[in-house]
Image (cartoon, helix red, strand yellow):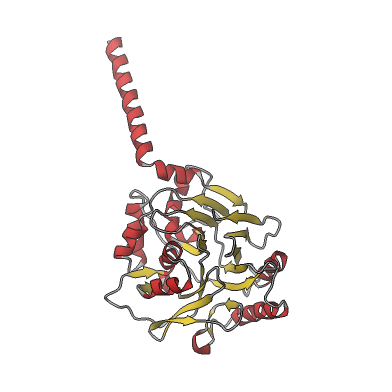
Amino acid sequence: MKKSLKISLIIILLLLVLITIILIVLFRNELKTLKSFIKIDDYGMYKMTYYGDYGFDDFLKQGATNDKDIEKFVTKKLLKGIPIKFNVTDSGCTAFITKNENKDIIFARNFDFTYAPSMQLYTNPQNGYSSVSTVNLSFIGYSEDYLPTKGISLNNFLTLSAPYLPFDGMNEKGVTIALLAVPEVQMESNENKITLNTTTAIRLVLDKASNVDEAIELLKNYNIYFSADVYCHYLIADSTGKSVIVEYYDNDLQVIETDKEYQVASNFIAYNNLNIGEGYTEFNRYDKVVNKLEASNNSLNINDTINLLNDVGVYDKDGFDKLQWSVVYNLTNKSGIIWAHRNKSNIIDFELN
C-alpha cells in the first residue's frame, strides 16, 4: 500500500514537472517579456521589452473596424484567452520638432490626460524595425488604484497587449510619431482598404516606415477609425529633419508641411489654416512653443526643452495637473529622455540599440 502510494506520488510529481516544462516552453517569450517589466518612476511609469512575435503582420491582413475587433485579436493572439477591454477618454497634448545645440533633430512631446500610468515599450519584430514607444496603460484598465507590479504576475499580464497601444514612439531609422487629440475629423472608409485604429496606425509607422514619405504612403493604404470617437492627428518626423502633420479632413488624408525649420502640433486642425480647436489652451500652448523656437533660432539645449515641455503642460479648469508624461526623442542618434508628471528630479535616459 505504501509502495503504491509512493509510486503514485512520484508519477504526479513527474507529471507536474512535465506540465511546468511544457508551459515554460510554450510561454517562454511571454514569461521573458513579463520578467523584463520594471518600474522607473513612482508616479506610475514602467519599462518593458517585448520578446517574440506579437502578430502584427497577421493583424494587418484583417485590421479592425472597432475596438472590440482589436480586443478579440489581442485576447486570442497575445493574452491566451484572457479578455481585455479598452478604455479611451479625451486628451490634450503638445509636440514639436526642433534641433539641439549639436544640430541633432529633436522630437519633443507632452501627453496630457487624466491620471495615466505609462510604459516605455521596446520591440524588435522579425519583419520590421525595432522601436521604443510610450504606452498609455489606462487604455487597458490600469489606474491609480490598480497598477501593474514588477516581474511575472497575473495583474501585469495585460501589458502583453502593449505593442498594439503606442501613443508615441521612435524606430531604429529615426522615424518618430505621436498622436494628439483634435475636435473633429472628416473621413469616409474605402471598402477596398483594411481598417486600423488610432494606435495600430502608430504601430504600422514604427514597424514599417524608414522615413516620413514612407509613413505617409503606408497610412494612405489603410482606413482609420478613432477609438471611442476620440479624434486625433499625427505629428511625424524623421532623422533628416523632415516633418509633417497628418490629418483626416475633407474625406481624405491631408499632409500639412511647414516652411520653417521646426514644426509644432497642438489640439487643433491645421489643414488649410482652419485652426479648429477645442476652445481651451491649444492655441496658447502652440504660441508659447513657436515663440520659444523663434527666439532661440530653432536650437534648444536639453534643459530648455525640458523646461518648455513642463511649461506648456496642461492644467484643467479646476487646477488639476494633466501632464502625464513628457518624452524627447533624438532622431539623429536614436536616444532620448522621458519623465513623468513634470518630475525633473527623475529624468530617465534611454537608447534604441
Q: Residue at x 34, y 48 (%)?
A: 80
**Residue that appears at 71% across and 56% down:** 345
- Whether residue 301 sits left or right of residue 35 in the image: it is right
Left or right: 248 with respect to 235? left
The mark total stands at 0
Residue placed most toward the observer, 131 or 327: 131
Horizontal and vertical percent position of residue 333 = 59, 61
Q: Depth check: give the residue in front, 45 or 122.
A: 122
Quarter of the image holding residue 1? Answer: top left
Give the x, y percent position of residue 322.
Answer: 60, 67
Q: Is residue 215 above or below residue 3?
A: below
Judge whether 189 appears above or below 40 on screen.
below
Q: Residue at x 59, y 79 (%)?
A: 282
Q: Position of residue 86 (x, y in %)?
A: 42, 62
Q: Nearer the viewer, residue 151 or 316?
A: 151
| Residue 301 location, quadrant | bottom right
Against 152, is 47 above or below? below
Give 4 or 58, whichever is nearer the viewer.
58
* Residue 102 visible from this viewpoint: yes
What is the quadrant of residue 306 in the picture?
bottom right
- Residue located 51% across and 66% down the image: 175
Location of residue 135 in the rendering, given as x and y in whole percent from the top left corner:
50, 60
Instruction: Report whether residue 314 is seen.
Output: no
